[in-house]
Image: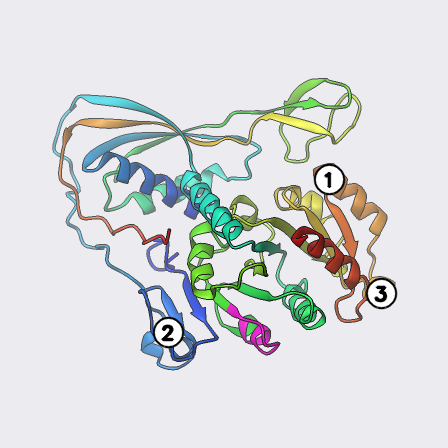
Amino acid sequence: MCATCGCSGDARITDTQRIDARTTDARTTDTAASTGDPSLAYPHAHSHSHGQEHPPSHGHGNPPSRTVMLEQKMLARNDEQAAKNRTWLAERDLLAVNLMSSPGSGKTTLLERTIRDLSARVQVSVVEGDQETTFAAERIRATGCPVVQINTGAGCHLDADMLARALRTLDPPPSSVVFVENVGNLVCPALFDLGESARVVVMSVTEGADKPLKYPHMFRTADLLLLNKTDLLPYVEFDVRRFREYLDKVNGRAQVIQVSVTRGDGMHDWYDWFLGLVA
Amino acid sequence: MHELSLTQAVVDTIAERFGDTHVIAVRLEIGKLSGVVVDSIRFCFDLVAEDTTLAGARLEIVEPCGRGRCRSCSQTFDVDDPIVLCPACGSANVEVLSGRELRILSVELSGEERPCAPRAAAPATPE
């Protein structure tokens, strides 16, 4: 979305694999453009008019009107694209995992370790979602993993259309795994189906055990809850049992796996979980 | 602020469907358990509708209350909170019957077609 006028659809997609890649449409940039020429850094298709062509007064008294019943989902367009994404992924035997969390829970660090630990077992590609910068994508790229960065600008979540464009840019190999790191936000991403195979919420013990009750929409949609930074449990007031009780109130079916990504605790349980989805 | 995206989706859907026909009113259904802030939708609507066939349209929003049915004790009850617990037995194993609706119910259209300011082309969506 555009911070100037509120229009949407200006998410930028950066292929960090192909530095020389040219811009394929007004909203797709390469790394060189996003970090080099500032005139190219914010390509924004501002084709719509901001003028005053629209007459302020309609000048008609009481014209006859008619009511048309629609009974249509507000998110119908997103859901249709999500269904297309799901088909596209299935045709290529791809597993897509949507990772959601608040900022700073450790999603990127989780991915870095997962990619390094499993490089011999499974091919992984990553779609990174952030409002700005390619920092996360550069970290993933340093592991040798194919990655595409979506910058949502003023947007607070990824949607199915953004993922569709990112997947075509990424072009992941058949029978591999695509991790989608959503924009760090415990509210908005919950509402948008991307066409993913599974939804994982990452939460760190520094965030407090009451998060499932504070952000019920996000936790309600999760297939798996990864509780991260458990190495910090001795130093913070986080009651794991109470956290599970709170989670059960909004989502009784989600599995919880405790991990410390930096120390490696619980990582094999996480690998077993998503590799089980591949099988 | 997912309400801005939602409002954009509503305006795009209606504007594309009815072409140049001026829209007088839009009626939405936003359930009280949907996680969408109605005041934010209202705030965004005028902004998003500007320079489209929906400019100046009246926005009506109905907000159905939540209803739930307990899978443990079969009790049905009103729900006004996104954390849905059975008031009879306390179970969280509840089927939400209503309250999560996010729908465009109807639109009221002007009887006369009237040219409007050109709209932005919809973003291209890869198939």
Q: In the visual, does A135 lie left or right of B106?
A: right
Kindly state the secondary structure of the residue where label 3 is placed: helix
Indicate which disc, 1 or 2, sits on the residue closer to the N terminus: 2
Q: In the rendered structure, find residue A235 and report the number of the disc placed on it.
A: 3
Q: In the visual, does A224 lie left or right of B125?
A: right
Label 3 is found on which chain of the structure?
A
Q: In the rendered structure, find residue A253 and report the number of the disc placed on it.
A: 1
What colour scheme was applied to this rendering of the protein? rainbow
In the rendered image, residue B76, in percent from the top left (x then y), is placed at 68, 18
Task: Using the rendered view, name the quadrant where residue A227 is placed.
Answer: bottom right
Which segment did they paint magenta?
A137-147
The residue that disc 2 covers is A41
Q: Of tags 1 and 3, which is closer to the observer?
A: 1
Distance in Å between CA atoms under marks 1 and 3: 29 Å
Same chain assignment for discs 1 and 3? yes
Front one among B110 and A256: A256
Same chain assignment for discs 1 and 2? yes
Label 2 is found on which chain of the structure?
A
In the rendered image, residue A78, in percent from the top left (x then y), is placed at 44, 44
Front one among A61 and B34: B34
Dot 3 amino acid type: Tyr
Dot 1 amino acid type: Arg
Indicate which disc, 1 or 3, sits on the residue closer to the N terminus: 3
In the rendered image, residue A265, in percent from the top left (x then y), is placed at 82, 65
Would you say residue A209 is visible in this rendering? no
At a point 73% along the width and 55% down the height, the residue shown is A226
At a point 45% along the width and 61% down the height, the residue shown is A166
